Image (cartoon, grey):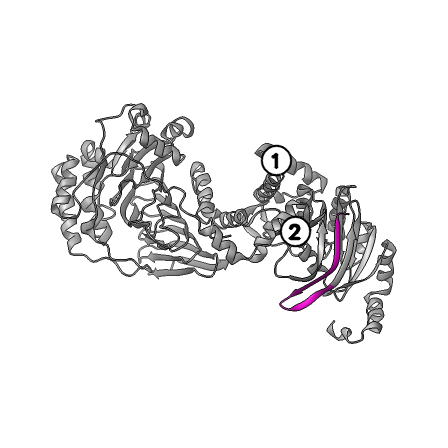
Amino acid sequence: MESDPNKIIGEVTQSDYKYGFVTDIETEYAPKGLSEDTVRYISGKKNEPAFMLEYRLKAFRHWLTMKEPKWAHLEIPPIDFQDIFFYAAPKKKKEYESLDQVDPELLATFNKLGISLEEQKKLSGVAVDAVIDSVSVKTTFSDTLSKYGILFCSMSEAVQHHPELVKQYLGSVVPYTDNYYAALNSAVFSDGSFCYIPKGVRCPVELSTYFRINAANTGQFERTLIVADEGAYVSYMEGCTAPQRDENQLHAAVVEIVAMKDASVKYSTVQNWYPGDKNGKGGIYNFVTKRGICKGNNSKISWTQVETGSAVTWKYPSCILLGDNSVGEFYSVAVTNNHQQADTGTKMMHLGKNTKSTIISKGISAGKSNNSYRGLVRISKNATNSRNYSQCDSLLLGSGCGAHTWPYIQVENKSSIVEHEATTSKISEDQLFYCQQRGMNAESAIGLIVNGYAKEVLKQLPMEFAVEAQKLLSISLEGSVG
Amino acid sequence: MLLSIKNLHASINGKEILKGIDLDVNEGEVHAIMGPNGTGKSTLASVIAGRDVFEVTAGEIIYKGKNLLKLAVEERAREGIFLGFQYPVEIPGVSITNFMRTAVNEIRKYKGLDPLGGGAFLRLMEEKKKLVELTSNLANRSVNEGFSGGEKKKNEIFQMAMLEPTLAILDETDSGLDIDALRVVANGVNKLRTKGNAFMVITHYQRLLDYIVPDFVHVLFEGRIVKSGTKELALELEEKGYDWIRKEQTTDDRYQISDI
């Protein structure tokens, strides 16, 4: 007779992190701490051209003048930037031609996560640029992609082989002056993915990257740049899990997307960084700046995210709708449990005429967590006949958690329409009882109800991801709902 | 005996609703539970199913030789108890297919059976849909979301067909149904009747019993079963109305009438 929802919620959400393990891979570190020397060290390690070092140094100097943002609904202990490793690279032989040459430990790690490269290669037709710590270890499918003229490689490689593109687009959507964490990232970014889809090319596979923080006490600063040229299409997936740690780990990523005329980019994320233990000890601090610009007319950028991890999440994937008739979308499920805190949402900046944006945000809070939606819809004077539809729902599991919604709406012309809907609900005892009466235990019942609640967002994910995300939602709430 | 209820007392928020129920149900039997509103019919159904807002203060329920009151809601369900809800709840975003598949496979797991694969499950759904004459494409819709009253009730019968319970309790499944929907619901029940299972049909009106012919009729009044008989009792009730019961009871205890 354990159907008291609070009790159920307590049990399901208090389970421990499933992916908490450390892989023993030889790692090479930069000296601890942050200074111009660190920046030079990183740039030097990567053998970067002068313009890149220049850019990093400018960003670093600017960062020194900035302060951490305090406006988010987050409680974060002070971060000692001198106590962090800003660069860690697995020591490796020069190049890998096949998976046989890849460190077996590393492959085992991927296997534990159920995302083995081999399987991926054989079964899913997904090209994987697997980033472990800071350096890309293995890039697959690049040959296939190059047939279409698609460039998909690590950011480090892009800097070496396509400096003109990097120079043209890096920082063009998120300048290093944008915010504290973007400046930090611009100074010390370690690696990430680079993707360029040429004119008129429809990328035939889902591109994906798995990020994983592995070396202890190492900041992780991913930098991703996706450029879809005129009429191009690409669907990009990013997912991550991280091993269990006691010390907080800093993660400050920047993702930039450029969509030219008639281009379309779909960016999907499943984020499952280590969230800390039941008592709020440890966990990743995740400060992410993600932004795309619909530069040309009729372009489209769609963000889908499933956020279940991190102790702290600070993340607002946004769209600048510059081209006329351009479309921005944001679909988000954010789950917080135990002592997790999330302040996430989006910005839709309507600049072009007839621009459209859709925001669907589903927050799920359990335990003692806090889950906030923060979003801005700005329709500028020239963005006539523009439309936005926003729906922000919060689902509470138990009574110890919080859900907050801060929608900011600015409309500067009279021909545009903005709609905003918001709901807050609890999993009802009636729903639980109904499911249990059909033979389900409380955990599966809650998994089912939560997945139903998040369906609008989950259905936006590519198939491979959707299945993973559904499991993840249930796992994330294990022990909270009980 | 499948189900044996003895001197069952249950209350909610300190208010006693069931005041000593005695009821025996054997396999192969259909029992109709009748009575005016607010006499504890739905409470009885909920207590058997294990809803914990009701506190059992005295008495026992033995089901398949087990102390039912010690089993969790889902264990009762897996042991073959099905409750057709009076007000089926909506579960947005969860398709009936997904809902049923989860339920069927959890019950199979409990019984030590392998889960049904996608194809086998869909075939089972088709078969049961036919059996209960479910023609509309409810299966792809979210559980009860936006369903009409009739659709909700048909969906309950469909779920019953899928889960093949040993004891099915239908809580006012007939309420709010037009005559066609009523016939569909009743046909479903009749097709599912076997020698090995039993039904408790809770209803306010005799109308349903024209279609589902009960072996026994019990009249619940003020938390007690005050009359039991065969199907003729339902007809008598129809003819004389519940006032008949009220009058009989108030001669025993005239103060309780004011509570109605």
Q: Residue at x 29, y 30 (%)?
A: A138
**Closer to the N terminus: mark 1 or mark 2?**
1
- Above or below for B62 versus B115: below
- Above or below for B240 versus B32: below
User: What residue did someone put label 1 on?
Assistant: B113
Residue A106 — which label? none
Q: Is residue A314 left or right of residue B50?
A: left
- Indicate the position of residue A328 as horizontal and vertical percent values: 37, 48
Q: Is residue A454 left or right of residue A78?
A: right
Residue B152 — which label? 2
Q: What is the count of numbered marks? A: 2
- Above or below for A247 versus A114: below
- Indicate the position of residue A31 as horizontal and vertical percent values: 16, 43
- Indicate the position of residue A20 as horizontal and vertical percent values: 36, 42
Residue B42 occupies which quadrant of the picture?
bottom right
The amino acid marked with disc number 2 is Lys
* Mark 1 burial class by Cα count in 10 Å: few <14, some 14-19, many 20+: few
Q: Residue at x 36, y 49 (%)?
A: A275
* Mark 2 burial class by Cα count in 10 Å: few <14, some 14-19, many 20+: many
The amino acid marked with disc number 1 is Leu
Magenta stretch: residue B23 in it?
no
What's the chain of the residue with tag 2?
B
Image quarter (top left, top right, bottom left or bottom right) of the N terminus of chain A: bottom right
Visible in this render: residue A429?
yes
**Magenta residues?**
B1-19
Magenta stretch: residue B10 in it?
yes
Between the C-alphas of marks 1 and 2, the distance is 30 Å
**For this rendering, which residue is in front, A238 or A327?**
A238
What's the chain of the residue with tag 1?
B
Q: Residue at x 24, y 45 (%)?
A: A219
- Above or below for B142 versus A44: below
